[in-house]
Image (cartoon, rainbow, N blue to C red):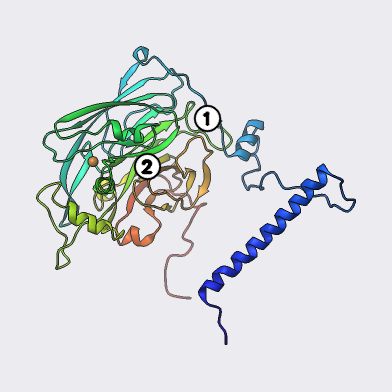
């Protein structure tokens, strides 16, 4: 028998697609000519749909025309334009940053004039125990992996003082995905040990965005995979909205920063430990180039958001979780719950998706979800590549207190002998 080889199999569908496209072009050309020239009597009515029907095209019950427009376009509000401000006249506020998974104090809705939000981050190179007996020099913004969450409002200015103490060995900087220009600020914030720099950028893009160190070349993934990344949340004017344009608020907010590590092994397969921050660079590059992480964890080290670090909520709470991954994809899923509202790609100018089981965080991005907790008990918030969740520990525990609802779920008969 004459089996087609793999290349032929690949080519045949391609040829079919090309033929169909050519036929479509010929048909369209005919219609276009027919309009301008003499219309042949037999030309059938032919029109292309202006938009594909979308499952979200149906407006929510009771929603007005604004909501209909929002649902069809996927936007609840057009991105606004902003006039430059005289920064010297604006109100200045200092935001005290806190270690994740917690958020700094902030207002969910702020409709006032733009403000200058001052934040200070001190870079710290420090050895951490990624998993029992496994050590790595982490490069951190403010001492934590991930770095602290910064929260501002659309139109505000973020004014960051970035400090690189002389106790560090390496040059660092910061690239804010939320910002516009100069490699996200990377080219304006290079600081060697013993230096500090002040960068101001305007937060015009409502959404959640990562920031990370980006000192150039392979130093970029090296610093990022040593923990040097965090996130900014830019809340839209008027706060968060559902697809119908109605406000959504949250009762608790947690920041989950997922981190992949590539820790070199010695000739016996044991993880190596190094004397200083810079010492592992050559070995790290080899380990990184395998593209296979040795560790995938939430918030810096194995088990950080479990046991003493577990997340908590009460039945009835709306829980906001911002999930970032600066280097790799992730698939957040709340076992026993849902993403009731999900800004999968992190942009708050897009309407949230609703009722998702699992969503995707693209490499180099953050996404946000709000889950209403309806039952008490233990939830597992994980990346639903289950190997990454359970064999690598890419997971967090969320424990909720409150009244169990038998209407939602009930064990009708407990396990027992087969009748
Ligand atoms: Cu760095
Ligand atoms: Cu980046």
Crowding around mark 2 (Cα neighbors within 10 Å: few <14, some 14 to 19, many 20+) is many
Q: Residue at x 79, y 47 (%)?
A: 33
Point out the residue furthest to the front here: 37
Give residue 79's mark.
1
Disc 2 and disc 1: Cα gap in Å?
A: 33 Å
Q: Nearer the viewer, mark 2 or mark 1?
A: 1
The image quadrant where one finds the N terminus is: bottom right
Residue at image x 26%, y 52%? Answer: 303
Q: Is label 2 in a helix, a strand or a loop?
A: strand
Q: Position of residue 151 (x, y in %)?
A: 36, 31
Quarter-of-image position of residue 178 = top left
Q: Is residue 5 above or below residue 315?
A: below
Residue at 30% across / 35% down in the picture? 186
> Which mark, residue 370?
none
Q: Is residue 132 above or below residue 251?
A: below
Compared to 241, does 267 lie above or below? below
Along the line of sight, which residue is nearer the eye, 406 or 116?
A: 116
Farthest bottom residue in view: 1
Residue 313 - label = 2
Q: Secondary structure at mark 1?
A: loop
Residue in front for this viewpoint, 86 or 317: 86
Can you give x and y, in whole percent of width and height, for residue 355 in the image? Answer: 52, 48
Where's residue 348, x and y in %? 48, 35
Viewer-nearest residue: 77 or 3: 3
Q: Residue furthest right?
A: 41
Asked if the residue at label 2 sits under 8 Å from ligand 2, the reply is: no
């Amino acid at each position: 028998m004459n089996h087609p080889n793999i290349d032929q199999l690949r080519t045949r569908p391609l040829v079919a697609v090309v033929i169909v496209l050519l036929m479509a072009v010929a048909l369209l050309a005919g219609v276009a000519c027919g309009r301008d020239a003499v219309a042949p009597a037999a030309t059938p009515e032919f029109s292309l749909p202006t938009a594909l029907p979308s499952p979200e095209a149906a407006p929510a019950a009771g929603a007005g025309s604004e909501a209909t427009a929002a649902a069809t376009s996927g936007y609840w509000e057009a991105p606004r334009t902003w006039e430059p401000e005289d920064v010297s006249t604006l109100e200045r506020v200092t935001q005290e940053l806190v270690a994740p998974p917690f958020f700094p104090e902030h207002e969910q809705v702020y409709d006032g004039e733009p403000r200058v939000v001052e934040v200070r981050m001190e870079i710290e190179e420090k050895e951490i125990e990624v998993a029992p007996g496994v050590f790595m020099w982490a490069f951190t913004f403010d001492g934590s992996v991930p770095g602290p969450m910064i929260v501002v409002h659309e139109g505000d200015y973020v004014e960051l003082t970035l400090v690189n103490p002389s106790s560090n060995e390496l040059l660092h900087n910061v690239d804010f995905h939320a910002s516009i220009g100069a490699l996200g600020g990377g080219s304006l914030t290079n600081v060697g040990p013993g230096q500090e720099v002040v960068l101001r950028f305007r937060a015009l893009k409502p959404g959640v965005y990562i920031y990370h160190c980006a000192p150039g070349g392979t130093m970029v993934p090296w610093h990022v995979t040593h923990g040097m990344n965090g996130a900014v949340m830019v809340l839209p004017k008027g706060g968060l909205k559902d697809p119908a344009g109605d406000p959504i608020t949250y009762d608790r907010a947690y920041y989950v920063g997922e981190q992949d590590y590539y820790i070199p092994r010695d000739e016996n397969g044991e993880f190596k430990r190094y004397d200083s921050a810079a010492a592992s660079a050559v070995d790290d590059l080899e380990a990184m180039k395998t593209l296979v992480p040795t560790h995938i964890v939430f918030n810096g080290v194995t088990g950080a958001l479990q046991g003493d670090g577990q997340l908590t909520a009460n039945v009835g709470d709306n829980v906001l979780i911002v999930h970032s991954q600066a280097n790799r994809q992730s698939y957040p899923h709340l076992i026993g719950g849902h993403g009731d509202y999900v800004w999968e790609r992190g942009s708050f100018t897009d309407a949230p998706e609703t009722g998702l089981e699992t969503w995707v965080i693209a490499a180099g991005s953050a996404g946000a979800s709000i889950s209403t907790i309806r039952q008490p008990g233990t939830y597992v918030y994980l990346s639903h590549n289950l190997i990454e969740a359970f064999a690598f520990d890419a997971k967090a525990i969320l424990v909720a207190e409150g009244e169990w609802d038998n209407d939602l779920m009930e064990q009708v008969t407990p396990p027992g002998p087969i009748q």
